[in-house]
Image: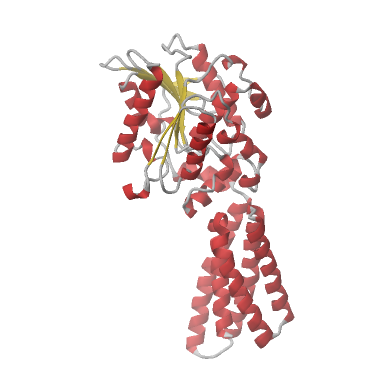
């Protein structure tokens, strides 16, 4: 009986891990199945309680289905169902042990109840997040607070650059502010969208990173947008298109040549800027997404710089690290309003790689090597090569150390400084044509 209890604890803990390892269920489920089969055999030999045998068989079936179909809702249902069953079984066993009179057994029971209580609270919290991702999504703005500067200002610098901050662009949505950093003699303009899982961060967090472009002779438009879950797909894309309309309308005022624009962004911002190129290049696709690009119809982006970009939205939970998988999946389920991003039609529609065509502009792709979208970034590179689109990339393997998601925007990072020089080389070659 003691062995059976330990097996139950093991099953409960392993099942709990599926909340975060759902995208790698194949690593955990086989071990759970083996433990359940051992438990089943022990039930036949020791207890012969039909209810326990039936419940164990039922959880085995759900675990097998989870392994076969690899669908988030099914995995979460199996996780929650199995958790409830084995919590009940353990509570029953602890209660039986508590009837024994020895102090040691009573102490073990107390410790068991405390440990199980912590695990139960974990199950409740993760189950809630699985069903209601908006709560965590909304709280990310508190977890990752941004330096937000609200007032409008114009900074004229000694080197001839001018920084226009917090300009309001017409929009149906909130947080409709953008900055324009104007170079003295601009070679071109970078239209930049910050990342943050569509749910957090602010344009002001990218200032130091973007100022370096200005020092090299490039204008920069740094865009804010309303954050999820107060805005969903494809409304965010509509809003950044409205920001682009503002730039188009006021291009002469800010010395911007709209025929010399490179779109860029990091993470979710890379997805937005890449998808914006796709809708500008394909009216049928724009109509499918529901984006009115008439005011920007003549704009043809000259280039694209993807920085740790989410080029395949369905793979938002495929970052090579279980914690970022879990976190990004929560944000994705909230943004796309779905229980399963990997099989969601909206996420498929949003994928940059899914809808790229031959008229996509020359591209520079960079990504880290840990907790990020390296695999899809490389697939995106391969797809562009197949379409004979000029593409430059930089991926450092882990022999250079672990490079986390969007390490490129850290101005103090050694490899970020190296890769920034490559961005500038790419831009200079692009505008020297």
Q: Quadrant of the N terminus?
A: bottom right
Q: Position of residue 342 (x, y in %)?
A: 61, 46
User: Which residue is nearer to you in this view: 241 or 303?
Assistant: 303
* Residue in the image at 29% along x and 38% along y: 412
- Which of the colour schemes (rainbow, by chain, secondary structure, one colour) is used? secondary structure
Residue for point 34% across, 30% down? 422
391 or 49, which is in the foreground? 391
Q: In the visual, does 149 lie left or right of 326?
A: left
- Residue 348 is situated, as x and y percent measured from the top left of the image, at 63, 38
Q: Is residue 136 left or right of residue 158?
A: right
Picture coordinates of residue 92 (x, y %)?
Answer: 63, 79
Report the front residue among 199 and 279: 279
| Residue at image point 36% right, 15% down | 186
User: For residue 240, what is the image quadrant?
Assistant: top right
Of the 4 image quadrants, the one containing the C terminus is top left
**Where 53 sits versus 317, above or below?**
below
Left/right of residue 272 with respect to residue 80 in the rendered view:
left
Q: Is residue 3 left or right of residue 390?
A: right
Q: Is residue 10 above or below residue 391?
A: below
Q: Which residue is situated farthest in the left direction here?
A: 158
Whether residue 30 is visible? yes
């Amino acid at each position: 009986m003691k062995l059976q209890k330990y097996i139950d604890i093991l099953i409960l803990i392993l099942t709990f891990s599926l909340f975060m390892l759902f995208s790698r269920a194949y690593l955990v489920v086989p071990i759970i199945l083996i433990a359940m089969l051992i438990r089943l055999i022990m039930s036949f030999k020791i207890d012969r309680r039909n209810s326990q045998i039936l419940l164990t068989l039922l959880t085995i079936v759900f675990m097998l289905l989870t392994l076969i179909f690899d669908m988030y809702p099914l995995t979460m249902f199996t996780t929650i169902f199995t958790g409830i069953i084995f919590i009940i079984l353990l509570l029953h066993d602890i209660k039986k042990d508590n009837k024994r009179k020895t102090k040691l057994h009573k102490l073990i029971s107390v410790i068991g109840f405390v440990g199980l209580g912590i695990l139960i609270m974990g199950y409740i919290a993760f189950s809630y997040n699985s069903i209601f991702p908006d709560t965590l999504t909304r709280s990310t703005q508190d977890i990752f607070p941004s330096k937000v500067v609200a007032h409008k200002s114009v900074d004229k610098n000694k080197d001839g650059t001018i920084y226009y901050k917090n300009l309001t662009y017409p929009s149906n949505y909130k947080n409709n502010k953008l900055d324009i950093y104007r170079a003295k003699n601009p070679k071109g303009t970078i239209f930049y969208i910050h990342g943050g899982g569509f749910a957090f961060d602010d344009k002001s967090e990218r200032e130091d990173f973007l100022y370096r472009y200005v020092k090299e002779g490039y204008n920069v438009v740094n865009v804010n947008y309303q954050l999820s879950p107060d805005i969903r797909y494809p409304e965010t894309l509509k809003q950044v298109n409205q920001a682009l309309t503002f730039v188009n309308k006021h291009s002469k005022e800010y010395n911007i040549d709209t025929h010399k624009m490179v779109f860029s962004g990091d993470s979710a911002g890379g997805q937005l800027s890449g998808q914006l190129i796709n809708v500008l290049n394909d009216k049928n696709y724009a109509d499918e997404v529901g984006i009115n690009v008439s005011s920007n119809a003549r704009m043809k982006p000259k280039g694209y710089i993807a920085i740790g970009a989410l080029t395949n939205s369905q793979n938002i939970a495929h970052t090579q690290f279980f914690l970022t998988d879990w976190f990004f999946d929560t944000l994705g389920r909230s943004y796309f309003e779905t229980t399963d991003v990997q099989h969601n039609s909206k996420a498929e529609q949003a994928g940059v790689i899914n809808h790229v065509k031959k008229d996509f502009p020359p591209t520079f792709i960079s990504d880290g090597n840990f907790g990020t979208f390296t695999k899809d970034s490389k697939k995106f590179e391969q797809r562009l090569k197949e379409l004979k689109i000029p593409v430059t990339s930089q991926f450092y393997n882990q022999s250079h150390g672990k490079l986390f998601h969007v390490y490129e925007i850290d101005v103090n990072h050694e490899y970020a400084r190296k890769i920034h020089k490559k961005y500038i080389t790419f831009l200079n070659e692009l505008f020297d044509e």
